[in-house]
């Protein structure tokens, strides 16, 4: 389903790396990104800025942007500012933008020849705490590329800024903040990873989640008609888990940065073509087997209208009485998490 929250205006709040130190303004990464993504960017980069000095000019940012890219901290590191002070400041800055209903991206850094491990971990921690995406290294793609830097070996040249802009552009697309001209393969979609307490801790491509059997979130939407029958469908043979199995729920994996309800509505429309109907929350659960570790949230809804099955995921389907489904599950392959949900709803 189309994302209604694509960035249109982006504040780029940072230091000389955002300003475009010693390159023409149109060669800075915010300007290049604006051209690539067809959005408007506001370059609030100032050379030498630390998080402390950035706080003082935060109130001067007055526009109606819907996103903020926060690239600060490297000057704090180089000047010896305590790491705790830096990240207290960054938290205030990010929350200021979040409180204005802006999508916020936090950018970290990695410097060749410097021990930045603790700082990299602190960026990860703040990103997780605020539940905002982290662009881990503003120098991504420039490692050991002397041809991409000015003589000081810290500030990129025009070639370097072009690489930075391209990588940030790709990052925003993968995080669904910008539309993609080409659909992202489902295996490359970033999914939300959680711990055993259901707290978000990371965002990784779907294929990595499957390969490493990481704990993730998924929605389960049970669709009933006015007769009380439940819609049962057969999954296609191409599904990455439980192929050609029967299932009693529409739904799927919650993507990075996606809310439960948003994910449920998206999946119901994508799989069955149903939208704009009330979803009734039932319960959450944790389930683990040899193939899957998932935190699930269950919804039910009623629908007597037409269905449009997604051919890539749904082979066929029909409405059946619930007792018939339990009978069918005795000799047909069903998704185990779906049967677990059905048992909790009707046999507990």
Image: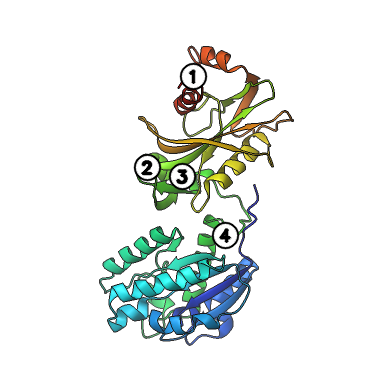
Q: Is residue 112 visible?
A: no
Disc 2, SS: loop
Q: Earlier in the sequence, mark 1 or mark 2?
A: 2
- Residue for badge 3: 206
Q: Which mark is residue 177?
A: 4
Q: Which mark is residue 251?
A: none
Alpha-carbon span between mark 1 and mark 2: 24 Å
320, above or below 104, in the image: above
Q: Write the residue at 59% across / 25% down.
A: 233
Where the C terminus falls, by quadrant? top left
Tell which tag, 3 or 4, sits nearer the viewer: 4
Residue 14, given in percent of the width and then of the height, sits at 46, 78
Alpha-carbon span between mark 3 and mark 1: 24 Å
Q: Which mark is residue 333?
A: 1
Disc 1, SS: loop
Q: Write the residue at 43% across / 62% down.
A: 134
Q: Earlier in the sequence, mark 3 or mark 1?
A: 3
Relative placement, left or right, of 299 versus 109 is right
Residue 198, given in percent of the width and then of the height, sits at 39, 45
- Using the image as rendered, state which of residue 91 and residue 317 is in the foreground: 91
């Amino acid at each position: 389903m189309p994302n209604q929250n694509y960035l249109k205006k982006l504040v780029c709040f940072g230091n000389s790396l955002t300003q475009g130190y010693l390159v023409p303004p149109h060669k800075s990464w915010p300007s290049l990104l604006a051209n690539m993504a067809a959005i408007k960017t506001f370059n609030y980069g100032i050379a030498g800025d630390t998080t402390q000095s950035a706080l003082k000019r935060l109130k001067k940012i007055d526009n109606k942007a819907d996103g903020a890219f926060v690239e600060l901290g490297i000057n704090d590191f180089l000047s010896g500012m305590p790491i705790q002070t830096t990240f207290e400041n960054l938290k205030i800055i990010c929350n200021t933008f979040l409180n204005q209903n802006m999508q916020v991206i936090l950018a970290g850094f990695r410097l060749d020849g410097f021990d930045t491990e603790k700082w990299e971990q602190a960026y990860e921690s703040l990103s997780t705490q605020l539940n905002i995406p982290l662009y881990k290294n503003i120098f991504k793609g420039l490692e050991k590329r002397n041809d991409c830097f000015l003589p000081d070996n810290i500030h990129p040249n025009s070639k370097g800024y072009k690489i930075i802009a391209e990588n940030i552009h790709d990052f925003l697309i993968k995080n669904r903040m910008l539309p993609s001209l080409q659909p992202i393969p489902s295996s490359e979609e970033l999914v939300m990873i959680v711990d055993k307490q259901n707290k978000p801790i990371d965002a990784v491509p779907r294929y990595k989640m499957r390969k490493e059997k990481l704990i993730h979130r998924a929605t389960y939407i049970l669709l009933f008609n006015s007769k009380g029958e439940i819609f049962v469908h057969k999954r296609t043979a191409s599904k990455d888990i439980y192929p050609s199995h029967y299932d009693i729920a529409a739904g799927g994996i919650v993507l990075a940065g996606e809310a439960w309800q948003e994910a449920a509505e998206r999946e119901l429309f994508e799989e069955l073509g149903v939208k704009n109907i009330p979803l009734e929350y039932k319960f959450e659960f944790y389930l683990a087997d040899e193939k899957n570790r998932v935190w699930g949230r269950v919804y039910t809804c009623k629908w007597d209208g037409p269905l449009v099955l997604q051919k890539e995921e749904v082979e066929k389907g029909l409405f059946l009485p619930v007792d018939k489904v339990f009978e069918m599950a005795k000799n047909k392959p069903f998704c185990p998490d779906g049967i677990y949900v059905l048992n909790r709803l009707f046999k507990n």
